[in-house]
Each structure stands twice: as C-alpha cells, then as structure tokens.
Amino acid sequence: MIIIGELINGTREAVRRAIVARDEAAIAELAIRQTEAGANYLDCNVGTVGEAEVEQMAWLVGVVSAAVDAPVCIDTASPDAMRVGLAAWQGTEPPICNSVTLERGRLDVFLPIIAGRHARVVALLMTDEGVPQGVEARVDAARRLVEVLEGAGVARDDILIDPIVTPLSVDADGARVTMDAIAEIMSALPGCHTVCGVSNVSYGLPARGLLNRVFLCQAIRSGLDAAIIDPLDRQLMADIYAAEALAGRDEWCAKYLQAYRSGVL
C-alpha cells in the first residue's frame, strides 16, 4: 500500500505555528518521524489561501525535501501554490499533485501545470455538479478524468483516483458507496490506483480511530491501494499489514512477517 503521511498540514495548530514561525526543525522532525514510521509520501498542506499560501508552500516543500528522501504530495487547490511547490521539490522521485478534478475551472488551470512533468496526480472525483452520487456516477467520473489525464500525458500508474469519502455522521451510506466504487474503479480502470483520506469517514463521531481502522481494512479488501493517513498511529499501521495479508496482497505474508520481526506489530 502507498502510505501518504497526513501530518504536515497547516490546519493542525502546531504545524500552523511552525509554518508561520518558519521553524524548519519542527517541520523536518515531523517529516523524518513519518518516513521512519513507513510513509512513502508526505502530504504538504499549508492550511491557508491566497498569496500567503504560495509563499508558504514553496518554503514548506523546500524544508521537507531537504529533510527526507520521501517525495511530497502537494495538497492545494491553488494553481500558483502547486506551481511553486513543484518547483521547490528537490528530490529524485516524482511528487504527487493533489488534486485535479472534473470541475471545468480547476481542470483548465491545472492541466498545463501537470502536462510535461513527471508527477503523479490525485484525480478527485468532483464535477461541476459536486460529488457524483452513487457508484455508477463515480465510476463514470473516474473514466472521464482518467481519459483527460492520459490525454495530457499522465501514465495510468501515476493516476490515483480519489472516490471521495463522505463523513458517516452526515451520510449513513457513504462509506459503503465509497468502498463499492473503489472495487468498480479498480476493475474498470486497470493500472490506476485508488486513494482516500481515511479520517474523513469518522468526522463528527466519537472513537474516530476505531472507525478509521475498520473502514481502511474494509477498503483494502475492496481494492484500495493508497491512503492518506497518520503513519504514527501504530495500531493503524499494524492493521494495514494484516488487512493486506488477508486480502491476498502480501505473498506468503512476507511483509506481515517482516513487520512482526521489526516490532511494528
């Protein structure tokens, strides 16, 4: 599974203070801890908008790229912030652009930024009408977005489709629809990946960690192969190894056994 560490996010108060204060040591420590815990990518979201976001994104990506080898996931709805984030990345592995949607205004400005670059892309299933309702509508949106991205030169292996996780507190059927959509998308669009922000499912409810863990295990069974999570959550990381082994995605339980021997479980 592709693990995208979610903790470098300016909506978290400690991270916001570090970004405002230009505290390189605090950001670098958080980057190192996440990669040591198993993160393959590090989400970078400054949590602001406007001119401040552009300046802060360039600084943040620069600090992370100097601290670790793991590539970044540049998380922004601003084309200018995406552009400077890509320019600031100094690593050898391609970063992730999070995200492109089918919303006409957003698609038109983001495609030229991505075209011609070796970058992976989160394809968020949002249209001008909002979140597609139902499994078939999400699969259709995924097909259209993949077609557009491939037309811009993005390889299927570099496309991570986000079917959108709605909070269980406001959409009682949302988790099931998302998991069914993951299964259908992985079948209909071989070569692509699926990704989701796991913690969205538990928003507004108690014992959020429990819901996050059970949802992620079920989503893995549906075919999810990338997740934006807190890699410092040891129980969640252990559950991933177990779920992938049980889903037949860990030949001879090799990764599970390695995790056990290294003390992760």
Image: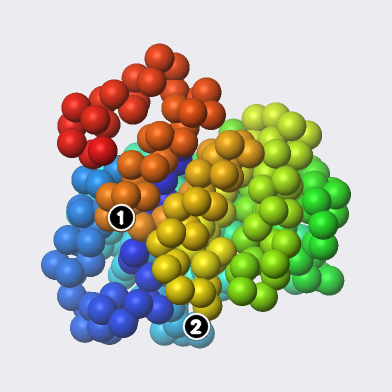
Which quadrant would residue 77 be assigned to in this image? Answer: bottom right
Which of the two residues, 125 or 46, is positioned nearer the viewer here?
125
**Contact flag, marks 2 and 1 (Cβ < 8 Å):** no
Q: Is residue 264 above or below residue 55?
A: above
Q: Is residue 255 visible?
A: yes
Choose between 12 and 22: the one closer to the eye: 12
State the SS at label 2. loop
Q: Classify residue 165 as left or right of residue 42.
A: right
Callout in the foreground (2, 1): 1
Q: Which residue is mark 1?
A: 233
Q: Residues within 10 Å of mark 1 (few under 14, many from 20)?
A: few
At x 40%, y 14%, the residue is 252
Of 254 and 34, which appears nearest the observer? 254
| Vertical order, 232 against 157 (above or below) | below
> Which numbered circle lies on residue 153?
none
Residue at 62%, 68% (x, y): give it.
Answer: 168
All told, the count of numbered labels is: 2
Q: Position of residue 109 (x, y in %)?
A: 68, 66
Q: Is residue 59 left or right of residue 190?
A: left
Relative to 92, 167 lies left or right: right
Q: CA distance from mark 2 to mark 1?
A: 29 Å
The C terminus lies in quadrant? top left
Residue 221 coordinates in the image, percent (x, y): 58, 36
The mark found on residue 49 in the picture is: 2
Please tell me which of labels 2 and 1 falls first in the chain: 2
SS type, badge 1: loop
